[in-house]
C-alpha cells in the first residue's frame, strides 16, 4: 500500500498567509468587469471548464490559489508536495487549505457569503470533480464587504499616489499621501473682519521699528498687527461618471476595471482627507443610473451604447442638490456619444460615426452644466479624431479640462486634477 506524507504543509498553513497582500493580489479578480482576457484558464488542473460564475465560491478558491502561486507564496514544487498524487486525500488537503483561507477572509470582515451552501440531492463523493464540495462551492456566491471595498480603495490610492513621490511624477513608492495644499504662510496688515491669526514675529518687528524700544511690556498699536494669510479649503461635490459600454472591454484591453479602481481610490481619498466633500458614482450606457459604492465592485460592462447626455443630466441633477462651494463632473469614457433618451423614454441608438442629432443633444446637456457652474473634466481612453474634437467642445463649453490618457496613467491624472482644485488662495 502506498502512503503519502505531508511534512511541509498542513491545513494550518492558512494562518501564515498574509491576508492583506492576498487581497491586494485578488483586486483584479474581485473587481472584474466582464473582460474575457487571454491566458491559460487553468494552468494547474484544479478547475473544471464547467465551473460556476465569476463570483462563485469555487471561482474564488481558484483565484486564491492563482494569487498565492503568482505572489511566490506557493511554488510549483510546494503545490505538488501539497497535492500529492492527485487522489481524493490530497485534493481534500488542498480544498481544506483554500477553505480555511476563505474563512479567514470572512472572519476578518473582507468578504461575505450571500447564501449558505446548498448540497445537491443524491449520494456522491464529497471531494474531487463532480463531488458535493465542488457543487456546493459553485452554488455559493461571495461579495465584498464595506471593509473590503475600503481596503481596495486604500491600496489603489497608495498605488496611484505612490508614483508621485513627494514633489512630482516618479517611479518610486512613497508612504506620503499628498493633500494638494500648498503652504504660503505670507502675512498682511490686519483689517477689520480678518481672523486674528496673528503673525507674532512680524507684529513685534513692526512695534520695535515704530518705537525703537525693546522695553517690556511692548507698546503695540493697531497698525502693528500682522496676520498670516491662510488658504481656504473649499468643499467640493464630485460626480464620477463611468462609461460601461461594450467598447470599454474591446480591442484586447480591459479599461473598466482600472476605472473602478480609480473610483475606489478617489472615494477613499475624499472620505479620509476631505470629509466635508461628497462623491457620487454614475454608470452610463444605454441609459444612466447612480450606484452605491458597495455595488461598484460588481458593476460590469455590457452590450451597451454610450448615452453621455443622460449621464450628464443625472450628474447635474445630483450636484444641484449638493450645497457645496464647488461642483464638478469627472467623466471617464473611451467612446463617442451613440445613444440618446427620447422624450417618450425610448432609446435612440446609432453607433455608426458621430451622429449629428446625438451630438447636438449631448452638447445641450453640456451647456446646461456650464449654466449651472459645473465644469466637466473628461478623461478619454481613446484617441480617435472624432472623439478628440468632441472632448475639445465639451471642455470649451464648460471650461473644464480634457485628458487623453490610458489605463496606466488614468488614476494619476484624475487624483492630481482633483487635488489641484481643492484650494484657492484668499488674499
Image (cartoon, grey):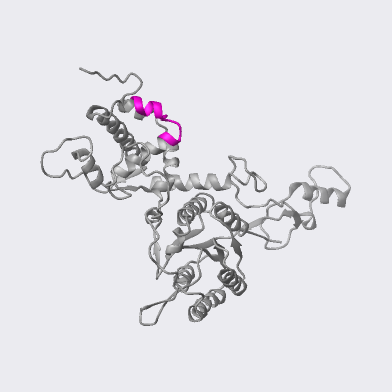
With respect to residue 171, does 399 lie above or below?
below
Q: Estimate the x, y position of residue 64 in percent, counting from the top left.
A: 37, 38
**Quadrant of the rendered structure where residue 59 is?**
top left
* Residue 106 in view, yes or no: yes
The quadrant in which the C terminus is found is bottom right
Residue farthest toward the right in the current orientation of the protein: 212
The quadrant in which the N terminus is found is top left
Residue 162 as seen in the image, left or right of residue 101: right
**Quadrant of the rendered structure where residue 224 is?**
bottom right
Out of 356 and 215, give the one closest to the viewer: 356
**Quadrant of the rendered structure where residue 406 is?**
bottom right
Magenta residues (range): 69-81
Q: Estimate the x, y position of residue 39 in percent, counting from the top left.
A: 42, 45
Q: Estimate the x, y position of residue 178 in percent, counting from the top left.
A: 60, 48
* Residue 19 in view, yes or no: no
Number of labels in the image equals: 0
Q: Estimate the x, y position of residue 187 in percent, counting from the top left.
A: 75, 54
Residue at 62% in and 47% down? 164
With respect to residue 193, does 265 lie above or below?
above
Magenta segment includes 72: yes
Residue at 50% in and 47% down? 156
- The chief SS type of the magenta part is helix
With respect to residue 314, does 274 lie above or below?
above
Residue at 30% in and 33% down? 100
Out of 54 and 103, give the one closest to the viewer: 54
Residue 219 as seen in the image, left or right of residue 330: right
Out of 17 and 352, give the one closest to the viewer: 352
Out of 131 and 376, give the one closest to the viewer: 131
Magenta segment includes 317: no
Amino acid at each position: 500500500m502506498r502512503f503519502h506524507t505531508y511534512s511541509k504543509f498542513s491545513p494550518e498553513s492558512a494562518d501564515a498567509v498574509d491576508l492583506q497582500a492576498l487581497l491586494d493580489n485578488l483586486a483584479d479578480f474581485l473587481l472584474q468587469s466582464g473582460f474575457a482576457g487571454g491566458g491559460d484558464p487553468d494552468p494547474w488542473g484544479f478547475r473544471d471548464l464547467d465551473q460556476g460564475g465569476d463570483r462563485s465560491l469555487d471561482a474564488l478558491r481558484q483565484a486564491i490559489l492563482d494569487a498565492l502561486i503568482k505572489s511566490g507564496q506557493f511554488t510549483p514544487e510546494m503545490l505538488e508536495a501539497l497535492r500529492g498524487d492527485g487522489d481524493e486525500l490530497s485534493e481534500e488537503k488542498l480544498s481544506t487549505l483554500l477553505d480555511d483561507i476563505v474563512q479567514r477572509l470572512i472572519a476578518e470582515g473582507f468578504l461575505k457569503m450571500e447564501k449558505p451552501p446548498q448540497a445537491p440531492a443524491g449520494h456522491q463523493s464529497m471531494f474531487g470533480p463532480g463531488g458535493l464540495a465542488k457543487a456546493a462551492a459553485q452554488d455559493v456566491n461571495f461579495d465584498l464587504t464595506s471593509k473590503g471595498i475600503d481596503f481596495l480603495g486604500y491600496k489603489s490610492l497608495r498605488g496611484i499616489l505612490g508614483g508621485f513621490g513627494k514633489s512630482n511624477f516618479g517611479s518610486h513608492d512613497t508612504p506620503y499621501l499628498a493633500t494638494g495644499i500648498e503652504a504660503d504662510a505670507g502675512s498682511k496688515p490686519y483689517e477689520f473682519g480678518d481672523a486674528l491669526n496673528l503673525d507674532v514675529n512680524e507684529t513685534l518687528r513692526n512695534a520695535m521699528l515704530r518705537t525703537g524700544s525693546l522695553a517690556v511690556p511692548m507698546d503695540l498699536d493697531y497698525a502693528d498687527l500682522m496676520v498670516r494669510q491662510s488658504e481656504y479649503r473649499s468643499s467640493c461635490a464630485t460626480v464620477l461618471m463611468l462609461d460601461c459600454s461594450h467598447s470599454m472591454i474591446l480591442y484586447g484591453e480591459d479599461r473598466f476595471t482600472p476605472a473602478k479602481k480609480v473610483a475606489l481610490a478617489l472615494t477613499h481619498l475624499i472620505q479620509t482627507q476631505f470629509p466635508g466633500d461628497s462623491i457620487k458614482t454614475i454608470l452610463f450606457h444605454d441609459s444612466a443610473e447612480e450606484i452605491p459604492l458597495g455595488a461598484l465592485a460588481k458593476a460590469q460592462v455590457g452590450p451597451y451604447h454610450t448615452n453621455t447626455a443622460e449621464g450628464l443630466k443625472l450628474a447635474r441633477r445630483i450636484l444641484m442638490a449638493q450645497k457645496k462651494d464647488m461642483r464638478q463632473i469627472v467623466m471617464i469614457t473611451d467612446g463617442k456619444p451613440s445613444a440618446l433618451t427620447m422624450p417618450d423614454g425610448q432609446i435612440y441608438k446609432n453607433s455608426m460615426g458621430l451622429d449629428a442629432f446625438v451630438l447636438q443633444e449631448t452638447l445641450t446637456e453640456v451647456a446646461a452644466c456650464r449654466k449651472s457652474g459645473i465644469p466637466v473634466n473628461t478623461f478619454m481612453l481613446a484617441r480617435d479624431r472624432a472623439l478628440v474634437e468632441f472632448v475639445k467642445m465639451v471642455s470649451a463649453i464648460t471650461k473644464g479640462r480634457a485628458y487623453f490618457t490610458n489605463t496606466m496613467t488614468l488614476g494619476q491624472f484624475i487624483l492630481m486634477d482633483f487635488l489641484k482644485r481643492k484650494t484657492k488662495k484668499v488674499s
